[in-house]
Amino acid sequence: MNDSGLNRVAVAAMGIVLLTSVAVAQQETFEPVRTSWGDPDFSGHYLPGAYQALETPSNESWTPVEGANQGQGAAFSRFFAPDPDAPNRPRARPGGSQGPMVIDPPDGRLPLQPWAVEQRNEIMARQDQLAHLDPRVKCLPAALPRAHLPVGYNTYQIVQNEDHILVLYEWNHHYRYIPLDDRPHVESAIRLGMGDSRGHWEGDTLVVDTTNFTDNTWPVGHGAPPDDAPGTALTTGHGVFHGGGLHVVERFTFVDAETIRYEATIEDPEVFTQPWTLRFNALRRAPEDHMLFEYACHEGNGANLSLMTGTDVDAVRVHPIR
C-alpha cells in the first residue's frame, strides 16, 4: 500500500475512533429502566440489530468502513429483502456506514493461526464435502457469539430475576440459563452446544463468561472470505471453527431505551493468535405483540440434499463482490 493509501486508512480509522468515543460518552449517561431489586431490566422481546459485516475484507484499497460495506456487507444484502412467505415479518436492517464488528485487532480482521487459515481455505474450497458444511445446515447449535449475530429469522426473549437470566433464541430453539452468582463452571468433561454460562453485573453492564463448548459448532458464521473464494463460500462454508478451549466473555449494555449493545471477547489459543473482540448494537426492542416463531430445522432439506444428488449448487448461490 502506498503512502497516500496509508494516510487514507489512518484518517478513516481516526474518524471511527472519534465517532465511537462520542457515542460511548452519550451511552454512559443513559439511565436504563430498573427492576424492583435495582438491576437494569433486560426482560422482554428483541429483534436482531442492524447488519454489519464481521470483519474487513482483504482488499487493501478499502478502508475498514468501505471494506465492511462494499465487500462482505453487499454480499449479504439478501438478508434485508422482504420474506415472500411472511412479508410483514421484521427483517434484519442494513448497518449503514459502519465499520466491521471486529474492533480488536484494529485492522478488523480475525487473528487466525496459520494452520487455521489453511483449514478455513480448505473448508471454503471443498463445499462438496458434508464434513465442511456449516453446522447450522445440519441443525446444530449456533454457539457464541454467533447466536447474537444479525440474521433475518432470529429474535430473542429475555426473562430475568435476581438470581438468573434466561435467554430464549428463535434460532433452532436455543436457550441459555445464566446464573448470576459466583458458582464455578461445570467440570471440563461436560460439553454443551451453547456452552456453560455464568453472569455478573459490572455497574449497569451484564457480563457473561461462557466455556465448555462442544467442538461441532462455529463461534462465528460470516467471516470475510479471501478475494479468490468460491461462490459457495459466501453461504455455508465461510465460517470460523474453534478448538476445545473456546472462552467467550460477553457484555450487554443498554445504549438507549430500545437498544442493547453487545460486545464479546473470544479466546481460543489453538485457533487464534490472540484474543479478539467484536462489538455492535445487537438487540432492539420488538413491538408489544411480538412472539417467537417456531423454528423448524430439517437436516438435509437444502444444501445437504443438493450435495448428495450432485446438484450444481454453485450456480444458485451468491458470489463474492469483486
Image (tube, helix red, strand yellow):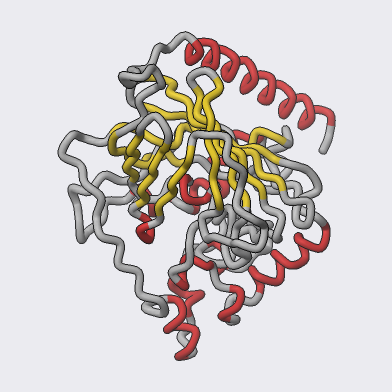
Q: Position of residue 66 (x, y in %)?
A: 59, 37
**Foreground of the two, 291 or 3:** 291
**Foreground of the two, 223 or 37:** 37
**Foreground of the two, 179 or 73:** 179
Residue at horizontal 26 percent and vertical 44 percent from the top? 90
Residue 237 lies, with reference to residue 2, above or below; the image says: below
Q: Position of residue 70 (x, y in %)?
A: 55, 43
Q: Quadrant of the C terminus?
A: bottom right
**Foreground of the two, 15 or 291:** 291
Q: Position of residue 272 (x, y in %)?
A: 76, 51
**Residue sitting farthest toward the front:** 183
Q: Does any portion of residue 101 appear in the rendered image?
A: no
Residue 232 lies, with reference to residue 182, above or below; the image says: below
Residue at horizontal 35 percent and vertical 25 percent from the top? 41
Residue at horizontal 21 percent and vertical 35 percent from the top? 287
Q: Is residue 35 shown left or right of residue 97?
A: left
Q: Does any portion of residue 204 appear in the rendered image?
A: yes
Task: Count the marks.
Answer: 0
Q: Position of residue 266 (x, y in %)?
A: 66, 44
Q: Quadrant of the N terminus?
A: top right
**Residue sitting farthest toward the left:** 289
Q: Is residue 223 shown left or right of residue 311?
A: right
**Residue sitting farthest toward the bottom:** 309
Residue at horizontal 51 percent and vertical 13 percent from the top? 28
Q: Quadrant of residue 85?
A: bottom left
Q: Quadrant of residue 277?
A: top right
